[in-house]
Image (spheres, grey):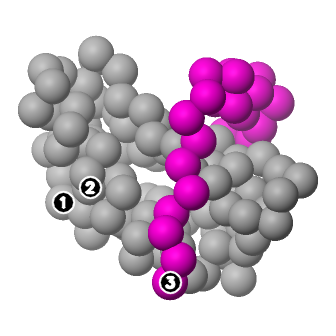
């Protein structure tokens, strides 16, 4: 499996928030949009609402780990942004994985 390509430009995130389709669960929000490159690019955001730095870092870590489990099933050519919610730092990565799988399936980006 290749390295995960990350979105890191503010304009990329804003484009997904405004034009992408969103799918929400109590622990995760997923924004999905087609891109012109043949790659899957992902971004993870955690706001101050999540808690202090330790909580936000944990949230990003478990979201990244859940995505790593699904990465080979995601169809190429999409930008994905995962937004942590208030409950995110308190659940296991398997719960995040379940929510992420459901949202990506709903979005139609899983093989």
Q: Secondary structure at mark 3?
A: loop
Location of residue 5 by image quarter: bottom right
Foreground label between 1 and 2: 2
Rendered image: mark on residue 79: none
In percent of width and height, residue 43 lies at 52, 43
Give the residue displayed 89% in from the left and 53% down from the top: 36
Residue 50 shows up from this direction: yes
Neighbor class of circle 2 (other Cα within 10 Å; few <14, some 14-19, many 20+) is many
The C terminus lies in quadrant: bottom right
In percent of width and height, residue 46 lies at 36, 29
Neighbor class of circle 1 (other Cα within 10 Å; few <14, some 14-19, many 20+) is few
Q: Is residue 88 above or below residue 111?
A: above
Q: CA distance from mark 2 to mark 3?
A: 19 Å
Q: Is residue 22 located in the magenta-colored stretch of the structure?
A: yes
Q: Is residue 63 above or below residue 7?
A: below
Magenta span covers which residues?
1-24
Q: CA distance from mark 1 to mark 2?
A: 7 Å
Rendered image: mark on residue 92: 1
In percent of width and height, residue 80 lies at 63, 49
Taking the view exactly as shown, the residue that stands out farthest to the top is: 48
Give the residue displayed 45% in from the left and 41% down from the top: 44
Foreground label between 2 and 3: 3
The residue pinned by badge 2 equals: 62
Determine contact: label 1, label 2, CB under 8 Å: yes
């Amino acid at each position: 499996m290749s390295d995960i390509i990350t979105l890191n430009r503010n304009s990329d995130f804003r484009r997904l928030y405004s034009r992408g389709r969103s799918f929400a669960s109590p622990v995760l929000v997923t924004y999905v949009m087609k891109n012109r490159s043949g790659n899957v690019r992902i971004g993870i955001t955690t706001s101050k609402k999540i808690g202090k730095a330790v909580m936000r870092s944990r949230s990003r870590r478990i979201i990244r780990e859940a995505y790593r489990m699904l990465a080979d099933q995601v169809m190429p050519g999409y930008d994905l942004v995962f937004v942590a919610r208030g409950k995110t730092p308190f659940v296991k990565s398997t719960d995040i994985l379940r929510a992420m799988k459901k949202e990506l399936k709903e979005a139609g980006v899983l093989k």
